[in-house]
Image (spheres, rainbow, N blue to C red):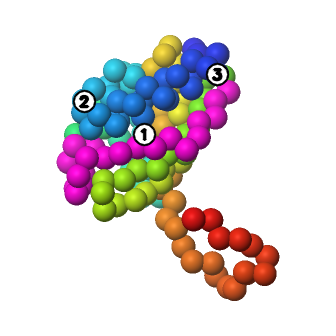
Amino acid sequence: MTTNPTAARDVIHEFWRLMATNDFDAVGAVLADDFVLDWPQSKERIRGAENFAGLNAAYPARGPWAFTINRIVAAGNEAVSDVSIADGVVNARAISFFTVECGKITRVVEYWPEPYDAPFDRTQFVERIE
């Protein structure tokens, strides 16, 4: 089990570096044999590196995917990343909760938040983030 937060952070950095190559089979290098990724919003589970690579390769994209790490926070064998993802047309954000054991990612729970307009005029209380 990974107990060093730097080690977990390093594994997550490597995961996103490999994702940025768009060679999704290569990402398997940091995924455990029993890897599972859950998307609670769509109620889907991906088991194994092969299914993970296949899904990412099949996902319709307008160009190569680019991944910008906004933040990684790690403690023990857990890490959370906030990553911006784009293909030249699509701009998305993923918040991913990772479990790392023995230098491999065993589990990810990932959320894809959608931007939305403020529900009422709050301009006197807030400033816009661009």
Residue position for label 3: 5
Which quarter of the picture shows residue 127? Answer: bottom right
**First to last magenta residue range:** 56-75
The answer to whether mark 2 and mark 3 are in CB contact below 8 A is: no
Residue 73 magenta-highlighted: yes
Does 59 appear in magenta?
A: yes
Q: Taking 10 as reference, is 83 above or below it?
A: below
Q: Which quadrant would residue 129 be assigned to in this image? A: bottom right
- Kindly report which numbered mark, 2 or 1, lies closer to the viewer in this rendering: 2
- The x, y position of residue 29, in whole percent, is 34, 21
- Mark 2 lies on a secondary structure that is loop
- In the structure shown, which secondary structural element does the residue marked by tag 3 occupy? helix
Residue named by callout 2: 25
Q: Which sits in the foreground, 84 or 59?
A: 84
Mark 2 or 3 closer to N-term?
3
Marks 1 and 3 sit apart, C-alpha to C-alpha, by 21 Å
- The residue positioned farthest toward the right in the image shown: 125
Q: Are marks 1 and 3 in contact (CB under 8 Å)?
A: no
Tell me the amino acid under the disc marked 2.
Asp
Q: Are marks 2 and 1 in contact (CB under 8 Å)?
A: no
Q: Is residue 77 left or right of residue 111?
A: right
Crowding near the residue tagged with mark 2, few <14, some 14–19, many ≥20 C-alpha atoms within 10 Å: some
The tag earlier along the polypeptide, 2 or 1, is: 2
The disc placed on residue 37 is: 1
Is 129 above or below relative to 60? below
Residue 23 lies, in percent from the top left, at 24, 33
